[in-house]
Amino acid sequence: MSENPRAVAAPGRREWWSLGVLSVGLGLIVLDGTIVGVALPAIVGDLHLNLTDAQWVNSLYAVVLAALLLSTGSLADRWGRKRLFLAGLVVFMGGSLLAAVSTAAGPLIAARAVQAVGAALIMPSTLSTVNAMFRGRYRAAAFGVWGAVISGAAAVGPLAGGALTQWASWHWIFLVNLPIGVILFAAALFIVPETRGVKTRPGVDVDGALLSAIGFGALVFAVIEGPDLGWWTPKGKLTVFGWVWPADAPVSAVPIALAVAVVALVLFVIWERHREKVQREALLDLGLFSFSTFSWGNLTAAMVAIGEFAIIFVLPLFLINALGLDVMGAGLVLAAMAVGAFLSGASARHLAARFGSPGTVLIGLGLEVAGTLALALLLRPDSPGWLLAIPLVVYGLGLGLASAQLTGTVLRDVPVGISGQGSATQSTVRQVGSALGTAFAGAALSVSLALTLPAALDAAGVTGAQADRLADSTRESAGTMITQLRAQGSASPFGDHTTTVVQALSSGFADATRWALVIAAVFLLCGFIGAARLRRVAGRSDPAADPHDEPDETRPVRNR
């Protein structure tokens, strides 16, 4: 017998305060996924990173998150969500401290991995706790806050990173996590209730955890390293912990990594089905994907994340290196996304009341696609920052609408008892998307720069071996070479021709950035198609019924 949604008791003050604490915790780790972007040119220059290093600083955080979230979601259900949240904060603060004191690419990338381990403990713990605390119509309001925090934190990251980098140093984008983390730890200790999932099966799925980590990690590695290592024929040697893949090998390491990813992920699915068949504890309940809203919602979320993080990765590099803005100026341009996201996040529930949550997601993705394409059309090496901010506001409006309603839609049919797995699966999909977004954007930028920079230099009359070396240096430094030449002026090796060279490189960088934005728009368009399908399958159920208000043992028949 279904419980009347109107009879659900209203959450108390403690639940709402807990939502606030958990939302800030989520915001902290989402913020850390985007705050690095605008500071990246400064980090590249200070630590002498190349483009691949820069991609890993951005991507490894998402890669490790994606690899661990399924495991930590299961741990949260088993050991207690509050306990994992507190442990995650400690690990996250430790990683932040290590990142702040890093003096080279290796230690910084390793510190980002430690941060990601902490974030992986925090993220599923928070969402599943909210899922357990709120019922009926109050859950929709809680998820609305949740979605607004995700979109707002992701969008405000570049502005915060710009302010901290310009007025202090890039080290402070990590140090700022320490006082916030301490306050959150103390607040969570006294306010957030402990919740657990119901363990109905024996065992721990260690093999599933290893297979998922290998599969996701190898996939993102291949996409990031492809332009430098070669998609098939090796371009150079690969050295990992003293082990060398030689440059004269018959095939590059990239297709091997892709093959490992495919095999590991296929084995992961087979293994999880086997665990289900023998009634053992499984890392991922594949039955979740028999809920149509869960399947299509996750596909849509992945496409949104790929598009969003592709934009966040390439735009700061263009604004600072090619357009010549300072870090704070770039942060202000990118803050246009936050303005749009906050405006639409606050009004998303009103639109949802009229068009439904899936309809609101569809409207949001339409705005995201339009904003991204408009940005690609307006982007030039001499475009004023305010002009580029206009389509970013449109994009931010769409981001706020889509993110605010997508979370609740994906989890609307998931039983509370396995909400940890459900939320961890959704978070994993988002993080895989964000890692792939950075990877695809970086790959598109790298491949495009190899074509556009020589063409732009040739058009400016700069040819020969010197032009080839300059184009390669600009591509490998992610555009930092342009900033260095601009700062040197006529004292550079090009003398009085420096301005011409800088303009040519900026033009080539703008062309390459435009192609990366087109790639982002394609993924967002795929998300729009997924959202249209999501709206269709969500409309099959009775909109007056709230499936969360049925006891877990009497769940309705799943939509196929």
Image: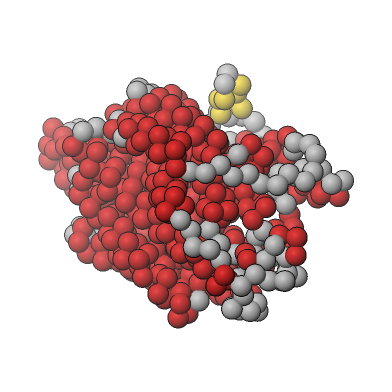
Q: How many marks?
A: 0
Taking depth in this image into account, of 177 and 246 the one nearest to the observer is 177
Q: Is residue 509 toward the left or the right of residue 409 in the image?
A: left
Image location of residue 258, percent across then percent down:
65, 44
Taking depth in this image into account, of 67 and 516 the one nearest to the observer is 67
Quarter of the image where the C terminus is located: bottom right
Q: How is the image coloured?
A: secondary structure
Image location of residue 251, percent across then percent down:
65, 37
In the rendered image, is residue 143 in sight? no
Image: 307 above or below 240: below
Q: Who's the residue at 55% across and 49% down the image? A: 129
Quarter of the image where the N terminus is located: bottom right
In the rendered image, is residue 20 in sight? yes
Q: Who's the residue at 75% across and 60% down the image? A: 553
- Residue lying farthest to the right in this orientation: 278
Q: Is residue 201 toward the left or the right of residue 194 in the image?
A: right
Taking depth in this image into account, of 480 and 271 the one nearest to the observer is 271
Image location of residue 132, percent across then percent down:
58, 53
Image: 362 above or below 122: below
Taking depth in this image into account, of 373 and 134 the one nearest to the observer is 134
Q: Is residue 427 toward the left or the right of residue 148 in the image?
A: right
Image location of residue 234, percent across then percent down:
58, 36
